Image (tube, grey):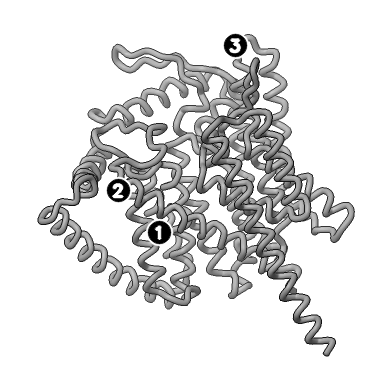
Amino acid sequence: MEATLNKNALSNNSRFNAIYNIMAYLYIGFLVIIIMSVGFSPIVFLALLLTSVIFIIPSHILGINIIIFMTMIFERWFTLQSLTTEYSIYKIYPLDILIIVTILSWLIYQMFWQKRKIFFGYAEKILFLFIIVNIIYLLKSFYDINADFEVAFSTFKNYAFYPLLYLLVVYSIQTKEQFKNTLHIILLGGIAIISFIVIGFINGVGLWTEYTPLSTSGVRLLAGTHAYYLMITTIIGTSLLAFNRFRNKGITSLILIIWILGISVSLMRHLWLSLFVGLTFLLVLIPITNRKNLTRLAVKSLIVMITLAITILLIVNIFPLYSFSESFNDSYLVITERITSIGNGGVDTSIGWRLEFWQTAKKMWLESPIIGVGFGKKLALELGEWQTFEEIRNIHNSPLAITIQIGVMGIGLFGLFIITSLFGSIKSIFKDKELQPYYIGLFAAICAILFASLFQPYLETNLTGIFLWILLGLFRTGVIINKQEA
């Protein structure tokens, strides 16, 4: 009788938690939609703050998951909308509010409830030192007449504030169930992004693609940020598929095909290359048996993709479906052009602009290679007859941006943190056969993100940069989870 009562109590508690979580996503999502419609006003700010406190203070892990999901769906509307009053604009974003409330929730939980393990290894010590260095550079920029303090503060947030998500993840997610749930939230975000792919094909242009204009002809059918998130989910999903962690391989393969299609029609060439790099690391890490299984599935999926592409081409040419037919045919031609343009930087203004920017930045860096030039600086850039001043943080190469601004010292700390975080945890991930597919997928996804950061300011933009910190934190949890299981 007592066992039955306990079972019913657990069931009721699970139902309550599920309803509670769903309500949190719905309320916060509704407020983000309001922000998209009317802007981020003080009234909306207070509503978002109150809602976050109500739902996240009792559960900091819920806060982490909401941050991930809302960023993947609403991207810049959740992460880059400034608080606007009648007289001023304050660069505090909805993302910032949720991070602060989630950290506060963790502190309350740590002080008054069950204490989480505070893991402070070499990686965490190096990250802490990296954050301290960034604080010093922020203070320095305040007294530098050649520095834009607003830009410097934004840079500081990306290099010192958002990395707190790494520590928040490591100190919050410390059980297998919590770890899996967070990874599943990332995958669910990827599934939700499929709706954006459909919208792009129907409308002939993707939502919010105007923020990343093309340097060649054509139209993006999916925003670059959404494609970036799909790159992550594709790599993690492929790893889980290789280890047979999905009930229905057919549906899973179809979802992966759609995700790859979404990355393709985003026309983000560096993401195509980054996905290839991530999948290569994945194939190297997984056991031979799983690699063979994945290869067989990949061959079958490729046959399905080719068959599906031929079928769609026939349908849209024999029975034109208005904008859909035009979108599909245009996408095919533009993808072909984008592929060929990779090897022709002289014609592509985007590639030429990057090369010129990097050369100019290199000359500036050589004036102060050890400590860099500091935050909030701009470079005079000339490309033919076109002249402009560009912020260093927009250099479209994150490691280079760190090097120019904080010097060899800064990039050295950053690189050392990445190495110690990854290789200090990699031994432990192979000990747990249950979580091994997740950790291998995470490692490959992190490698893909680091490669992609060579071509875009991903670490200088919060809606993309936070995923490096979150995935590194999730990967690092392998050390804690294995110690607790031992």
Q: Residue at x 29, y 72 (%)?
A: 300
Looking at the picture, does residue 292 appear above or below residue 429?
below
Q: Dot 1: within a 10 Å radius of its alpha carbon, few (fewer than 14), some, or many (20 or more) residues?
A: some
Q: Secondary structure at mark 3?
A: loop
* Coordinates of residue 147 in the picture (x, y in percent): 60, 15
Give the camera-side residue of 474 and 106: 106
Left or right of residue 171: residue 206: left
Mark with earlier residue (2, 3): 3
* Coordinates of residue 293 in the picture (x, y in percent): 38, 76
Q: Quadrant of the C terminus?
A: bottom right
Mark with earlier residue (2, 1): 2
On residue 201, which mark appears? 2
Q: Classify residue 219 by image quadrant.
A: top left
Q: Tell me if I can see residue 89 in this picture.
A: yes
* Coordinates of residue 183 in the picture (x, y in percent): 57, 61
Residue type (three-letter) at the residue carrying disc 2: Phe
Q: Quadrant of the N terminus?
A: bottom right
- Proximity of marks 3 and 1: CB atoms separated by less than 8 Å: no
Q: Classify residue 291 by image quadrant.
A: bottom left
Mark with earlier residue (3, 1): 3
Q: Can you identify the residue that label 3 sits on?
A: 146
Q: Secondary structure at mark 1?
A: helix
Cα gap from disc 2 to disc 1, whole angstroms: 29 Å
Residue type (three-letter) at the residue carrying disc 3: Asn
On residue 280, which mark appears? 1
Q: Residue at x 33, y 68 (%)?
A: 298
